[in-house]
Image: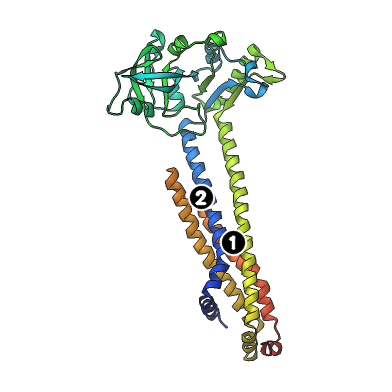
C-alpha cells in the first residue's frame, strides 16, 4: 500500500464516522487553540507594555520613600525641598524633576469635580516624554514667579470644556484660587512603568503647588518622589549610586533597611520580561494539558477502531497486506485526525487572539512560534498516541481476525 492510498483510505474512514471524529478532535482543537491564544496574548501584552516603556527610555531613575522598610506609614521619612539641589548636583547634569502629588476640587462656571494634581518642574515633560496637544507645558518663568498656571490632562480638559476646541486661556478654580490654563496634555496610554499619572492628571509648577498645599500635618513640604534621566546611559549606574549615597549619608537607614528606594527603569524592564516569560510558560503548560487529554482520546478511539475493524484487518492480511501496511494505515489515520484537529485549533486560537487585540486596542502580533508549535505538537501526538493502536492492529493474526464476529 503506497502513501497516497493510505491517506485516501484513512480520510474515507474519518468522513464515514463524522461525529466520532469530531468528538475525538475536540480535545485537540481546544488544546491547540488555548496554547496559541495564550502565546499570542502574552506577546501582544508584552509589546503593549514595552511600547510604553520604550517611550520613556531605560535611562530613568526614580527615588521614593522605601515603604518596605517600615511597619506602618507613620514611620516613613520623605525628602525635603533642600534635598533637590543636592540631588541634582549628585546626578551630574541629568534632567531632574521632583513630584508633589495631591487632589483638589476643580471648578469652572459652576461645575466642580475632584482632580488629580501634580506639582513638577519644567523638565518633567522631557523625563517622561509627555507632549502637550495645545498650548505649552510649565516653564522656568512659571517656577521663578510662582505663576498660578495649570496644564490640564486630556480627559480633564474634555470634562470641563466639552464644547471648546482649545481651552487654553480659560481660568479654573482649584479650591479658592484661580489658575490660568496654559496647556492641554496630549492623549496617552498609561505605561506599566510610570509615576501614576494619566489623562486625568493636571500639572502645576512645583513651587506654586508647594505654596498652596496645606503641609501642616507633615510639618512642612515633603517631596513624595524625585525623578532623574541621565543623558548618557553609561552614567546610569554611577548616577544611581551617587543618589543613594547622598540619601543614606543624610537619612541613614531604618532597622537595617535604607529609608529610600533608588530604582532604575532598566531593572523594571528586565523584571517585566521575566514575569511575562514565566507566565507564558506556566499558562502554556496548563493549556497543554488539554493536548494530552486530546491525545489520550485519540488513542482510545483508535483502539475502538481496531476492535471494530478486526475482520477487515484479517481480510487485508489474507490477500497480502503486510504488517507495515496495516501499521501505516492506522498511523496515518491518527496523524490526519491530529493535524485536522490541530489546524482547526490554530484558526480558533488566532481568532481569539485577534478578538483580544481588538478589545484591548493592542497591535495584533502573529504568534509564529505558537502556530509552529501547534502543528508540531499535533503531529507528535498523532505519532505517539497512534503507534500503540497501529501496532496492535498490525500484530493481529489473520486467522483469528477472520473468525472475529
In-image side of 223 versus 122 (left or right): right
Residue indicated by mark 2: 40
Q: Residues within 10 Å of mark 2 (few under 14, many from 20)?
A: many
| Residue pictured at 44% horizontal, 17% vertical | 121
Along the line of sight, which residue is nearer the eye, 123 or 397?
397
Instruction: Report helix, strand or loop for mark 2.
Output: helix
Along the line of sight, which residue is nearer the eye, 341 or 95?
341
| Residue pictured at 69% horizontal, 77% vertical | 392
Residue 4, labelled with which disc?
none
| Residue pictured at 41% horizontal, 14% vertical | 175
Looking at the rendered image, the quarter that the C terminus falls into is: bottom right
Residue indicated by mark 1: 377
Along the line of sight, which residue is nearer the eye, 33 or 266?
33
Q: Is any part of residue 237 visible from this angle?
A: no
- The quadrant in which residue 130 appears is top left
Q: Position of residue 143 (x, y in %)?
A: 41, 12
- The quadrant in which residue 135 appears is top left
Q: Name the colouring of the figure.
A: rainbow
Looking at the rendered image, the quarter that the N terminus falls into is: bottom right
Mark 1 and 2 residues: CB-CB less than 8 Å, in contact? no
Q: Is any part of residue 335 visible from this angle?
A: yes
Q: Compared with residue 283, is residue 128 higher up or lower down, i.e. above or below?
A: above
| Residue pictured at 61% horizontal, 56% vertical | 288
In-image side of 26 versus 156 (left or right): right
- The quadrant in which residue 29 appears is bottom right
Q: Position of residue 80 (x, y in %)?
A: 55, 11
Amino acid at each position: 500500500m503506497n502513501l497516497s492510498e493510505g491517506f485516501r483510505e484513512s480520510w474515507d474512514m474519518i468522513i464515514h464516522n463524522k461525529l466520532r471524529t469530531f468528538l475525538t478532535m475536540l480535545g485537540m482543537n481546544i488544546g491547540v487553540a488555548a496554547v496559541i491564544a495564550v502565546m499570542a496574548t502574552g506577546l501582544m501584552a508584552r509589546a503593549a507594555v514595552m511600547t510604553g516603556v520604550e517611550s520613556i527610555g531605560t535611562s530613568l531613575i526614580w527615588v521614593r520613600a522605601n515603604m518596605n522598610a517600615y511597619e506602618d506609614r507613620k514611620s516613613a521619612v520623605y525628602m525635603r525641598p533642600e534635598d533637590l539641589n543636592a540631588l541634582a548636583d549628585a546626578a551630574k547634569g541629568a534632567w531632574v524633576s521632583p513630584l508633589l502629588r495631591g487632589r483638589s476640587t476643580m471648578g469652572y462656571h459652576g461645575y466642580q469635580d475632584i482632580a488629580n494634581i501634580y506639582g513638577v518642574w519644567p523638565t518633567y515633560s522631557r523625563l517622561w516624554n509627555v507632549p502637550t496637544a495645545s498650548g505649552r507645558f510649565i516653564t522656568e518663568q512659571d517656577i521663578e514667579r510662582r505663576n498660578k498656571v495649570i496644564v490640564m490632562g486630556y480627559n480633564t480638559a474634555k470634562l470641563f470644556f466639552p464644547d471648546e476646541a482649545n481651552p487654553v486661556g480659560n481660568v479654573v478654580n482649584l479650591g479658592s484660587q484661580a489658575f490660568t490654563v496654559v496647556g492641554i496634555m496630549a492623549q496617552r496610554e498609561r505605561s506599566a512603568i510610570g509615576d501614576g499619572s494619566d489623562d486625568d492628571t493636571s500639572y502645576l509648577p512645583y513651587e506654586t503647588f508647594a505654596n498652596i498645599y496645606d503641609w501642616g500635618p507633615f510639618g512642612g513640604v515633603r517631596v513624595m518622589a524625585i525623578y532623574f534621566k541621565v543623558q548618557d546611559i553609561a552614567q546610569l549606574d554611577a548616577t544611581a549610586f551617587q543618589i543613594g549615597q547622598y540619601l543614606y549619608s543624610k537619612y541613614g537607614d531604618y532597622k537595617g533597611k535604607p529609608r529610600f528606594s533608588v530604582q532604575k527603569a532598566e531593572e523594571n524592564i528586565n523584571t517585566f520580561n521575566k514575569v511575562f516569560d514565566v507566565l507564558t510558560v506556566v499558562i502554556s503548560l496548563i493549556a497543554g494539558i488539554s493536548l494530552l487529554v486530546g491525545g489520550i482520546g485519540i488513542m482510545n478511539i483508535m483502539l475502538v477502531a481496531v476492535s471494530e475493524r478486526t475482520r477487515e484487518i484479517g481480510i487485508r492480511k489474507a490477500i497480502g497486506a503486510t504488517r507495515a501496511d496495516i501499521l501505516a494505515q492506522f498511523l496515518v489515520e491518527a496523524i490526519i485526525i491530529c493535524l485536522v484537529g490541530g489546524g482547526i485549533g490554530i484558526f480558533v486560537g488566532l481568532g481569539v487572539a485577534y478578538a483580544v487585540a481588538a478589545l484591548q486596542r493592542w497591535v495584533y502580533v502573529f504568534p509564529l512560534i505558537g502556530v509552529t508549535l501547534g502543528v508540531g505538537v499535533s503531529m507528535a501526538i498523532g505519532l505517539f498516541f497512534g503507534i500503540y493502536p497501529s501496532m496492535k492492529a498490525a500484530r493481529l493474526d489473520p486467522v483469528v481476525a477472520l473468525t472475529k464476529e
